[in-house]
Image (cartoon, rainbow, N blue to C red):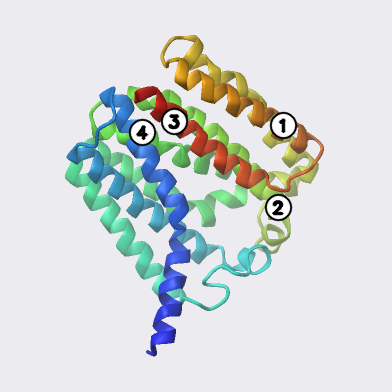
Amino acid sequence: MSAVARGGAASGAFALIRPRNLLIAAAGVAVGGFLALGRVAIPVALAWAMLSALGLGAAGNAANDVFDVAADRINRPLRPLVRGALSREAAIAIAGAAGGFGLFTAWWVGRALFVLAVLALAVMLGYSPWLKPHGLRGNLAVAAVAGLPLVYGAVALGDARAGLVPSLLAAALHLARELVKDVEDVAGDLAAGRRTVPIVWGTEAGAYAAAAVLALFVPLALLPWAAGWYGRRYGLLVVALDLGLLVLIARLARGRLRGARAALKLAMVVGLAALLWDRL
């Protein structure tokens, strides 16, 4: 294989695993651990849990691309499998190696984290072929897994309850983002024979559903502050986050989806920052 071909395969593998998403997941695991500890520190168990999340996330992302080629030809023609930067066999090998690494590192931490890792990986591997074609069921499943890192970090340090509320809030943001993605991906999802919310009920209903989820998130995100579970720093950032989400809700209600996915990813980062700042 030439140096150019090897470089193309390496960049394709890098794109396959979606490193930015993996970093957000690892950050979520870290913050979940901080919540369990009550301070900012990364003990060995938490470091292993962060590595496990990177492996599991990479496996899920790679598997998603393997199963999504038909839809990606229309929706995301620059994905590595679609443009031929990486073979299907290579993607499967990457998914297998990453998933094995994620499970091994979870097992190294402890039984509870290993069980959680197995369940999360099973959902990620089954998402595209079996869950996504059935609309809201798939959206809820991927949102639950996407919100899991906060619980994952807390479980690694023996206090699952510390990550439960933040995990539910994170899952709500992810659910809204998945609904927005479904509206944007109607053409490819139709070609793949899927029955997502906007395909069954219409793109307007899909946008309204995303706006409704965010409308529920806005007051719920303030509850931990109002209940005294988190302090003033958390409250200040969440108020700012909620104000931004109110603007996004208004845009979604008018069917204006441009920039919505990026805005929701930024909202996830701001939410993690609020939790982290509260523990500094």
Local crowd size for mark 3, using a 10 Å CA cut-off: few (<14), some (14–19), many (≥20): many
Q: Which residue is mark 2?
A: 184
Question: What type is the residue that disc 4 sits on?
Answer: Val
Q: Quadrant of the N terminus?
A: bottom left
- Residue in the image at 56% along x and 36% along y: 267
**Residue 235: horizontal and vertical position, in percent?**
51, 18
Q: Is 73 drawn above or below residue 180 in the view shown?
A: below
**Residue 245: horizontal and vertical position, in percent?**
65, 31
Q: Earlier in the sequence, mark 1 or mark 3?
A: 3
Q: Earlier in the sequence, mark 1 or mark 4?
A: 4
Label 4 and label 2: CA atoms lie apart by 31 Å
Q: Label 2's element?
A: helix
Q: Earlier in the sequence, mark 1 or mark 2?
A: 2
Given contact means CB atoms under 8 Å apart, are the residues at marks 1 and 2 in contact? Answer: no
- Residue in the image at 25% along x and 38% along y: 46
Label 2 and label 3: CA atoms lie apart by 26 Å
Residue sitting nearer the eye, 178 or 193: 178
In this rendering, the label closer to the viewer, 1 or 2: 1
Q: Earlier in the sequence, mark 2 or mark 3?
A: 3
In this rendering, the label closer to the viewer, 4 or 2: 4
